Every structure is written in C-alpha cells, then in structure tokens.
Amino acid sequence: MEGFYCGIDIGGTSAKMCLYSNKQDEIIHEWDVPTLKSADEMIIIDRIIASLYDMCASQGIKPESILGIGIGIPGPVTEDGVVLKCANLGWDIVPLKRIMCEKTGIDNVEVANDANVAALGEAWGGSAKDYGSIVMVTLGTGVGGGLIVDGKIHTGNKGAAGEIGHITVEPDEEAVCGCGCHGCLEQYASATGVVRLAKKEFPDKYSSDGVSAKDIFDDAKAGDESAFKIVRTFSKYLGVALSNVAAVISPDAFVIGGGVAKAGTIITEGVREYYRNYSLYALKDTPIELAQLGNRAGIYGAVKMVID
Amino acid sequence: MEGFYCGIDIGGTSAKMCLYSNKQDEIIHEWDVPTLKSADEMIIIDRIIASLYDMCASQGIKPESILGIGIGIPGPVTEDGVVLKCANLGWDIVPLKRIMCEKTGIDNVEVANDANVAALGEAWGGSAKDYGSIVMVTLGTGVGGGLIVDGKIHTGNKGAAGEIGHITVEPDEEAVCGCGCHGCLEQYASATGVVRLAKKEFPDKYSSDGVSAKDIFDDAKAGDESAFKIVRTFSKYLGVALSNVAAVISPDAFVIGGGVAKAGTIITEGVREYYRNYSLYALKDTPIELAQLGNRAGIYGAVKMVID
C-alpha cells in the first residue's frame, strides 16, 4: 500500500514542506507555508498541519496514509523533540514532537535542529549520497554544521555537536567572536567574517557598509589581488578547521553549503589545498564537495529522519 | 553457567592479559606475557594462546567456557580485525581476528587499536564510567586518542578517527611535526613536545639531553617560573584542542592519560581553564578527568569489546 511521509523545514519567514511517496520512492510534492514570529507557537503549528491536510485533500491522499512527519527547526532540540527556544520564530520551550503527535494522531514524528537535518538531506539525496558519515558546514551569516555518523544525526551532549563555526583556528586572535571566545572559524569563514577580514586588511578598498562576501569572491575571480588574498585566508582557516574535524571523527566526506558557498569551486579548490596541507596522510583525500540541494536539503533530511 | 572472557593488550615488550568472569562480573586474573619484535607474528600469537590455556588449566577453567577474546594492538586495525602494519611488533599485514578464531575455535574475537581499546576501558571501568560518549587523550612520546560514541569505539573512515595529536592548534607554526604538518597538538602536548618547548624558550636552563617532561612539571610544581610558563603553553594548546573536539562531537567527558598525565592535577587544572576560555557556553562544563586505570585500561577495554 502506498504510504506518505511529510518533511517540514521551518524557517523564520516560511516553512518548506513536502510529501514523499514510499511507493514512488521520491518527493512528489513541495510547497511553502508562510510563518511568522510569535510567542504563540500554536499559530504556526496549526497553520502547518492545516496546510498538510489541504495538500492531501487536493491530491486525493487520505490523511491516515501519512506514516510519519519529520521536522527541522532553527534552534536547539532535545532528543525528545522539545525545542529549547527558537529566536527566529519567537518561541520559548516548545514540546513540538508531542504536540504534533497529539494534533495529528501520528506516532512517527521526529524533530531536530535544521543544520543537522540539512546534513542528513545531503547525505541522503545530495552531494554526499554515497557516504554514511559526513560533516556538512553551512557558511552563512554565521558558520553552522551538522554531523551524520553511520547514517544518523549525531547531536552529542547538550545537542552541541557540529558547532564547526566555533572550532578555534587562531588561538591568539584578539577580535572577539559572537560566542565570546577568540579565533573561532566563524570569524574568518562566515559571510560576516570574510567582510571583516577585507575591511581589516584592505580598509581603503573595502570601506563601504554595503560590501558583501559575494563582492569579495567576485573580485577574486576577476583577478583582484587584494580580494584573492582574503580568499586565501578564508580557505586556510576553513581548511584547518576541516582537517581538525577529520582528525577527530574521520568522516567519509565533507559538504559545504550556505550562501557563501554559492561562490562555487573557488571555495572547494582553496579549501582542499589547505585541508591537505594540514591533514594526516590517511585523511588527505577525504572528499570536500559543494552542497547540491540548496534550501531543499532540509525537507530531504526531514523525510529521511522518519522513513528510517 | 559461569563463562569467561579474555582481554589482551599487546605491547612492544609484553602482552597484558586478563580473564573476566561473567558470573562474578569482574576481572579475576591478570598476568603478563613477554612479546618480542618479529616479522613472524605466529611466534607471539602462539605464545599468547598457550599462556591463556596454561592460565585456564592452573585455575580449573575449561577452555570451552571462554566465550570471547578481545585484543588491543598498537597499530591501525580494520573493521574486520586485520592489523595493517605494527611497527612496535615488527608486523606487516596480519589478519589477527581470523587467526585467533581459527586457532582457538572461538568465534567471538574482536581486535582494535590500543588507544581506542584503552578509551573503552576507561569508559567502562575507569574515570569515565558514568558516561556513554567520551574522548580519551593519551599524552606519551606522542599524543594519541580514542573515541567512544554511545558506548562503542568510533574508528571513522580508514580507522583515522581519534587522531587528537594531529589537531592543528597553531596554523603558523614553523617547526615540523612527525606527520609532516605544522602546528599539531603533539608538538606542544606530548612528552617530546613539552621538552621541545622548554629547550626553545629557555635554552640555557633546559639544554641537557636528559631533560624530561617530568622534570619540567616537577620544576613548575616547585614554583619555577620558566617551567610554569612552559606548562601554561602546554595547557593552552591542549585546552584549545579539547575545545575543538567538543565543538565537533560534544562528548560527555574527556579523559587524559599517558605518562605525561602522571604529573597529576597540574595538568587538569590548567587544561580546564583554557578549555573553558575557548569553548562555547554549552560546552564549558564538560568534565576533564585524569585516567584512573593506567596501563590496565587496555585489558578492561579488550574485555568490554567482547562482552557486549
């Protein structure tokens, strides 16, 4: 009998949703639902559930053939599926798994942090789909990460595993990271970090408030030496951080995603070079690939959490 | 019925062996067998098996009541229990698990790298016995490591996980590590590394060929300022490395063992301070403890591998 799984990736402005058919072995529908910031989480939850039932009705799918619901959310999540504050959504502590189970009558509900869910998505249907253990690094405003160990999300003690952005790559850095420490990867490899480096190294060239990481990567691709120097620094620190990750858990592959990674192969080429320089012999050839699923990684991973 | 498990920790000069009783739930005998460096691995293997049967005979234990054999070995080991060269023993590639199964008729044989096995031992019967996921760092001539994730050894791709000694803590270091890279933890936190730091920073004071890491820690404990400065540098880099490990996998606890750790609480106190300074808020309180089992950790872990 054909059964369906619903994947949901909840973000600050919209929730991306999908339906996966176990018979067709693929995602058969994708759609978005607007979210909004509200301390009353039930507004969003009710809207998402109503949207799922509407989609089922329009596609002739019986609600009882929904076999599971997977949810990624931008905040810390306990193993029991309790969201521990979510600043983007304005939520305090929300037992999301229990609420979803009660409201839908479906027992198979999983909730996890969105960076981890995206990593699972890339490991299932994206650029790391041949690998069981991967680390995904997301280079956005900050630097996030997700760990998949033997096909499962690894959250670690207090859910704090995969905090790749807060690996210390320069112990003697004087500038302070958002986390209060010094020399975190995020200070060099996030969009904000790349701009910070550029303004510090080349204040005359990159003084404008509007300068973006994309500008700097574009300049480097166009042959600009100053910009290229910034990209080298970015690559060095990201390469060092990934070599450290490898020395700890030796994943089968790395995946790099997020807005900064849209710069493309200039990212992977530079990082691979430094990664090799700083890695043990046995680790030098670990693949480092660009993410393939973009903002769809979350719904892939959300489905994968509940079909297993 | 009472059954027994044999734990074996093979080293360059001797193999430490034990028998564990499932009825008494404890290790009931411990003994040593001399090993020797030889390209013919069968000499050592036969000697170990003969010694096991001798012990069984002397204790009135029937060989058929041996339910499993766990072995730790100082070299890389595949998941199938094949040892891939072991310099300390003079071995090339040895399918140790298969040989032991064939020679003893026992199916339940597990072989793993000795650093990983020691970590499992500390997680089972040592200073980390309340924790499911731990990282053990062994500070000896080099710096080794072992990862236990959810109660199991995690070896990673190519068995290269837990190479804590080769985490890069100082990307701009000019001195070269034994692995060929620059700025590895091992260059600062191994016995050799501590002496290297002392000779570099205080060449007049620590010029002698016979100076040891123990001398430096003893001097620091006695109030010597130069030695204390070296210990601070050691603590800083070990703290940075552990904070990086935590950002990747967030273990429940760290255990520090090996010869250098015999210096005692001067190690853990300094490392905890720097670890906190370089760690995310959620990770700051991860326990960092000294190993308790010393050179018995290997036989504990070897037994634990086969009773699960």
Image (spheres, coloured by chain):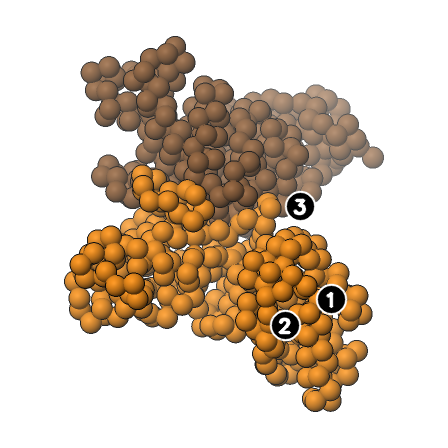
Chain colours: A orange, B brown
Please give the name of the residue rendered at 77% of the width and 27% of the height, measured from the top-left corner: B24
Residue A304 falls in image quadrant: bottom right
Amino acid, disc 2: Gly
Q: Which of the marked residues, 2 or 1, is nearer the chain's N terminus?
A: 2
Q: Is residue A147 above or below residue B305?
A: below
Quarter of the image for the N terminus of chain A: give it: bottom right
Quarter of the image for the C terminus of chain A: give it: bottom right
Residue of label 1: A100
Residue B294 falls in image quadrant: top right
Q: Position of residue A169 (x, y in %)?
A: 35, 46
Q: Which of the chains bears the disc numbered 3?
A: B
Are the residues under marks 1 and 3 on the same chain? no
Please give the name of the residue rendered at 71% of the width and 72% of the height, measured from the top-left corner: A46
Please give the name of the residue rendered at 43% of the width and 66% of the height, measured from the top-left corner: A258
Residue of label 2: A7
Q: Which of the chains bears the disc numbered 1?
A: A
Q: Position of residue A266 (x, y in %)?
A: 29, 67
Q: Secondary structure at mark 2?
A: strand
Q: Is residue B169 above or below residue A147?
A: above
Question: Is residue A221 visible in this depiction of the protein?
Answer: yes
Say which of marks 2 and 1 sits in front. 1
Say which of marks 1 and 3 sits in front. 1
Foreground pick, A96 / B130: A96
The single residue placed furthest to the right in the displayed view is B1
Q: Which mark is residue B107?
A: 3
Q: Which of the chains bears the disc numbered 2?
A: A
Q: CA distance from mark 2 to mark 1?
A: 13 Å
How many marks the image carries: the answer is 3
Amino acid, disc 1: Met
